[in-house]
């Protein structure tokens, strides 16, 4: 069953970087040429403008309102107390679930990485459970806890635990023995070993785990809301959809999308920082 | 610390012991569940025996055709479309940096948007049949495949590129024989992410609005208080999740053996 361990997830960070990898790419040249820098936004506006045009001329079905109509709906919707309640509910379920799941995942990952016997005893069960998506437990949770924010929070935490646990575990077992031996030879105290050896080696893995876990937790929270009518933006999207209030529906989808984008930006920045440190460490070693 | 890192040969004699340690907990869990639930009269936790009997009566007989195959078929069809479209578009965009740069905000938004928010939208636009579900799964899983392909194709070794050019490989030959194989590790990583998203979307689309499928039956069972059927549905979805995602990891390992060896040299 150890064969089921996927290649370390750090490699899959590659999925996050269109337009920022090589010196000769437009993104790099753009720093010097303002016209080029504006290109992505001009293109985006052009696409939205085309949609506006197609919708206004009736080329699109009435279920697809024009961009300006959606923006108008968003502007009217965002200041309302109902929207703010749903936004807070979504962020709460997501945020608390993520933090609780991350703490449990990191704690378990450290324990499994530090105690080989514990890993040997539990890895078959863990390798099984990691591949069961959190939404699968949804009917059971609703049966036991009802359609409550707690059920949503619980599932978000559950979806967070697995990536955090395995990333932390890879980080802990990946610490080169020579680093640990060196620390011992230098007579580092436990807290010095923690800050100088363990944390720098493990943090990049934890950062990657957090990015993967966060996008998954958001998917789970929205899913619980649309399916079970737990309060939140997902429920509102489903309600607007079934009542045929399409501009508001798209406005909320855009809001959820923007939350996803912001989340990604923040966590990718965190991750790049942690990884940068990791890479420079590796160079000095070789 | 070094004692745990002994080479494999030194511990070979202990292999049966290690295997026993690995399998102990799964056996204990199943046995404990079996006996702890044996006399259960709780409406929420039926005996494991009942759950397994229900499992056999439903998921191993008529529901294979009416629910299991439609579920898996929709997921695999959506995933297959996403892989074909994602790899082709990604290979093109990876060779046209200016175009992928121009489309970057749109692509990043598509990737970051929580896929499940689109489930009600897809029903508004397309209805609740098979095709809407397939198209939705394809749409949300195309982004990880495409973005990873763009990245992989773009980062082909420059020396390798020059070599293929001096050998006068045609454009098509370069794409098929050099660029795509070189990008394979990233494409497969994207496909792995896409497949897990496809599985989640299969379940969620069936829980939200459907007329058949494993998720649909499981939720109906919960709402009509057929608790054993609900448990068996969750069990089946769990096993399928492990099979689908776990098998892909094995396939990926196998296909990328050259890559792992390469990196060790």
Image (cartoon, coloured by chain):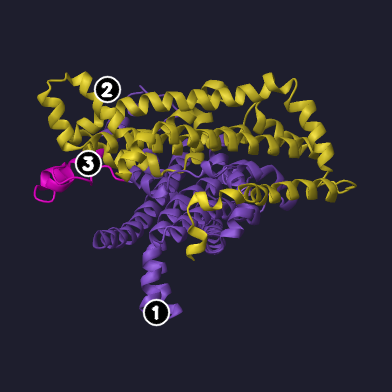
Chain of the residue displaying label 3: A
Question: Residue A35 in the image: x percent, y percent?
Answer: 11, 44
Q: Residue B264 carries which label?
A: none
Name the image quarter holding the C terminus of chain A.
bottom left
Q: Earlier in the sequence, mark 1 or mark 3?
A: 3
The image quadrant of residue A104 is: bottom right
Q: Nearer the viewer, residue A210 or A29?
A: A210
| Callout 2 touching callout 3 (CB < 8 Å) | no
Image hue for chain A: purple
Question: Residue A83 in the image: x percent, y percent?
Answer: 50, 53
Viewer can see residue B133: no
- Give left or right: position of A39 versus A151: left
Chain of the residue displaying label 2: B
Residue depicted at x 64% and y 39%? B238
Q: Give the range drawn in magenta.
A: A17-46
Q: Mark 2 points at which residue?
A: B176
Residue depicted at x 75% and y 50%? B28
- Tell me the element at label 3: helix
Magenta stretch holds residue B145: no
Q: Label 2 to label 3, Cα distance in Å?
A: 29 Å
Magenta stretch holds residue A20: yes
Q: Name the residue under label 3.
A: A40
Q: Residue A188 carries which label?
A: 1
């Amino acid at each position: 069953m150890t064969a089921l361990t996927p290649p370390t997830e750090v490699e899959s960070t590659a999925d996050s970087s269109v337009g920022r990898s090589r010196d000769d790419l437009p993104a790099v040249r753009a720093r010097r040429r303002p016209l080029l820098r504006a290109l992505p936004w001009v293109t985006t506006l052009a696409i939205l403008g085309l949609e506006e045009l197609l919708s206004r001329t009736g080329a699109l079905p009435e279920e697809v309102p024009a961009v300006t109509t959606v923006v108008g709906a968003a502007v009217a919707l965002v200041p309302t107390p109902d929207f703010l309640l749903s936004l807070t509910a979504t962020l709460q379920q997501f945020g608390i679930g993520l933090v609780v799941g991350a703490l449990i995942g990191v704690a378990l990952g450290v324990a499994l990485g530090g105690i080989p016997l514990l890993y040997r005893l539990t890895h078959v069960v863990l390798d099984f459970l990691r591949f069961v998506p959190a939404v699968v437990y949804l009917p059971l949770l609703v049966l036991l806890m009802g359609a409550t924010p707690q059920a949503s929070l619980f599932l978000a935490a559950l979806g967070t635990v697995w990536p955090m646990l395995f990333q932390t575990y890879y980080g802990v077992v990946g610490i080169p023995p020579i680093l640990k031996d060196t620390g011992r030879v230098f007579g580092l105290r436990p807290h010095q070993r923690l800050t100088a050896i363990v944390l720098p080696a493990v943090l990049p893995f934890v950062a990657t785990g957090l990015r993967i876990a966060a996008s998954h937790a958001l998917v789970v929270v929205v899913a619980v809301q649309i399916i079970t009518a737990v309060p939140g933006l997902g429920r509102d999207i489903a309600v607007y959809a079934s009542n045929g209030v399409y501009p508001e529906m798209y406005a909320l989808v855009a809001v959820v999308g923007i939350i996803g984008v912001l989340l990604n930006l923040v966590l990718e920045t965190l991750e790049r920082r942690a990884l940068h440190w990791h890479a420079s460490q590796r160079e000095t070693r070789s | 610390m070094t004692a745990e890192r002994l080479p494999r040969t030194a511990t070979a004699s202990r292999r049966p012991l290690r295997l026993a340690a690995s399998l102990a907990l799964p056996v204990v869990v199943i046995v404990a569940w079996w006996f702890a639930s044996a006399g259960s009269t709780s409406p929420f936790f039926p005996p494991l025996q009942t759950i397994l009997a229900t499992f056999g009566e439903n998921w191993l007989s008529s529901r294979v055709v009416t629910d299991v195959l439609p579920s898996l078929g929709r997921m695999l069809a959506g995933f297959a479309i996403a892989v074909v479209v994602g790899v082709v578009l990604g290979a093109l965009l990876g060779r046209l940096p200016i175009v992928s740069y121009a489309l970057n905000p749109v692509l990043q938004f598509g990737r970051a948007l929580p896929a499940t928010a689109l489930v009600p939208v897809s029903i508004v636009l397309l209805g609740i049949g098979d095709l809407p579900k397939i198209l939705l799964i394809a749409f949300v899983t195309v982004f990880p495949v495409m973005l990873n392909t763009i990245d992989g194709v773009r980062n082909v070794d420059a020396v390798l590129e020059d070599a293929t050019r001096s050998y006068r490989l045609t454009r098509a030959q370069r794409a098929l024989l050099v660029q795509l194989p070189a990008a394979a590790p990233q494409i497969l990583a994207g496909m792995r992410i896409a497949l897990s998203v496809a599985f989640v979307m299969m379940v969620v689309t069936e829980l939200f609005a459907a007329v058949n499928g494993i998720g649909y039956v499981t939720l109906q069972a919960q709402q009509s208080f057929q608790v054993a059927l609900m448990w068996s549905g969750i069990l089946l979805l769990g096993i399928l999740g492990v099979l689908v995602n776990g098998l892909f990891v094995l396939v990926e390992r196998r296909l990328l053996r050259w890559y792992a060896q390469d990196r060790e040299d």
